[in-house]
Image (cartoon, rainbow, N blue to C red):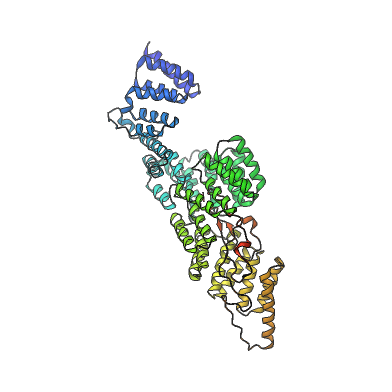
Amino acid sequence: MREEEIEKLRGVVRDCVSKHLYSSAIFFADKVAALTNDPADIYMQAQALFLGRHFRRAFHLLNASKIVLTDLRFRYLAAKCLEELNDWDQCLSMLNLPHHHTNNSLIYLDKDPAAAEINISSAICFLRAKAYEALENRAQARLWYIAAVKADPLCYEALECLIEKHMLTCDEEATLLSSLQFGPEDGWLSSFYSCLTKKYDKESVVEAKFRELEKESCISDSSDSSITQTLKTNTDLLACKAEYYHQCGEYQKCFELTSVLLEKDPFHLKSTLVHLAAAMELGNSNELYLMACNLVKDYPQKALSWFAVGCYYYCIKKYDQSHRYFSKATNLDGTFPPAWIGYGNAYAAREEGDQAMSVYRTAARLFPGCHLPTLYIGMEYMRTHSFKLAEQFFMQAKTICPSDPLVYNELGVVAYHMKEYNKAALWFEKTLAHIPSPLSELWEPTVVNLAHAYRKLKLYHEAISHYEKALALSTRSVSTYAGLAYTYHLQDNFTAAITYYHKALWLKPDDQFCTEMLSVALVDECRCGVDPKIEFRRSEDKASEFPTNDSMKLRQLFHSSVCAELTLFPMFSTSGSLSSRLWWEVLPMFDSNDFSVVGKIVNYTFKRI
């Protein structure tokens, strides 16, 4: 057969592959390889067999050719066949074979800067990482994923695994991105990658990243505005923005954006996950139900589908069913972080602290770059009044993610529990310093926490100032009005105290604390009116008629149910977790058993859901 006819057959094979006619491609590729016995034709035949899902036959063909020792393409394709066969040990053995350098093989070791291709060594590092991860050697997997990205920044899959599976801390992600060597034309890619990482930086920094990305896209081709338009409306970029809105606590804005994205692309799974997280925060059970039904119908084998079902049951407070479906999601995909977080939170909602901590510890081991499991372990210890242990875990969470304001809030809460009020005030101040301005109602509990700490330090003017700031954020908080009234009461400003006790009782007429303290304030005002020389000394640690209770309890509620309580509201944080408000220390009539743990938020973002 003439060379022209063989070349024509090669063209037929390539065309069959492009049209997904793999049986035809295998048929003609087999004939070409038999006629020429050329390594390139053998590789083409193996490619056709691989695409036709004849993995064992493709591996046998490659292994029998012996070219696997000299050509990295052959070795990589043989290892891919073993990957599809789930033979991970042999896959690693194939990738670790000694390589005999020849002039012919050197062209595959280094990528041609002018060629639009990914370095073969980067692809091999990535496959090694997948093999180690499948063998549960996560430390080696992490190293090889990093090696894959460093070998070629265009290997997006490796970076995606590092980010989505939380293998790196915030600082490690920043260090990795700064070490990547992008080409001069890949500036937009550097900006895009920085938008994919954890978004706990200052608001101005994150916003600048998005602006820089759009700016780069404008500069990239001034004669064609289609690139700019494509990037501005790109689903991946908008999904990153939605995730950022969720972490900032702007749940309604996040929900609206993801709704638009899912109308445009109903099967974009990253947008789906952020949409589920926003719906959870807003308590939108109807949307969760519809999403769960569609996902189970379209993707019955994906962990995300059953995670959505678990979120629905969690939202309607059916924690037994929620626990069951989160467990199913972890069984389908053990590397899906939101499912593990939801699984632990379902146990915590049922007040099964030991099981919850067991799940959180597993999540902390699987996802060393995610601070939420460690944070939740600290919350569980704090719930059982093991404050020293709680503080240790909060500090670990701070090491993993030093910019999440919720970590500082929890450190402040535990310091308050241990009566270290100066330290508590410092942590609460740091919390507010890490929150994007202006403050939203989400962070009203932190402002109240700081006011409580100032009151304990007898800094009454500062305490009153922060109570008033809290009222500007939420005007229907009984505990804030009661705190403000009590602070005025401690200053012997009985008129103001009586006014705010009345406001608190207007919101909650049966509030025992405000009712009794109102009576005391009225008596005090009358006494002052009769004999102004009478001096009434009060302290927050000793009330004459109402003994104190400094063993402040933690109540865990959804933010959607944050209502008029005389205590420590939890809230959904920007990281998808729960924060606590300090219980009033002047309420001995309440016992920790009077309140049940409803739970913490189920989140991926829940990445930080």
Q: Is residue 406 above or below residue 505?
A: above
Estimate the x, y position of residue 581 in percent, counting from the top left. 58, 63
Residue at position x 64%, y 79% from top? 493
Estimate the x, y position of residue 385 in percent, counting from the top left. 52, 63
Q: Nearer the viewer, residue 330 or 468?
A: 330
The quadrant of the rendering that contains the N terminus is: top left
Q: Nearer the viewer, residue 55 or 198?
A: 55
Q: Report whether residue 290 is seen.
A: yes
Residue at position x 68%, y 74% from top? 516
Res 564 → quadrant: bottom right
Estimate the x, y position of residue 289 in percent, counting from the top left. 65, 43
Estimate the x, y position of residue 344 in percent, counting from the top left. 54, 50
Q: Which of 226 and 62 is in front in this view?
A: 62
**Residue at the top extreme of this rendering:** 1
Q: In this view, does 7 lie above or below 372?
A: above
Q: Report whether residue 279 is seen.
A: no
Residue at position x 44%, y 54% from top? 400
The number of discs equals: 0
Q: In this view, does 16 lie above or below 409?
A: above
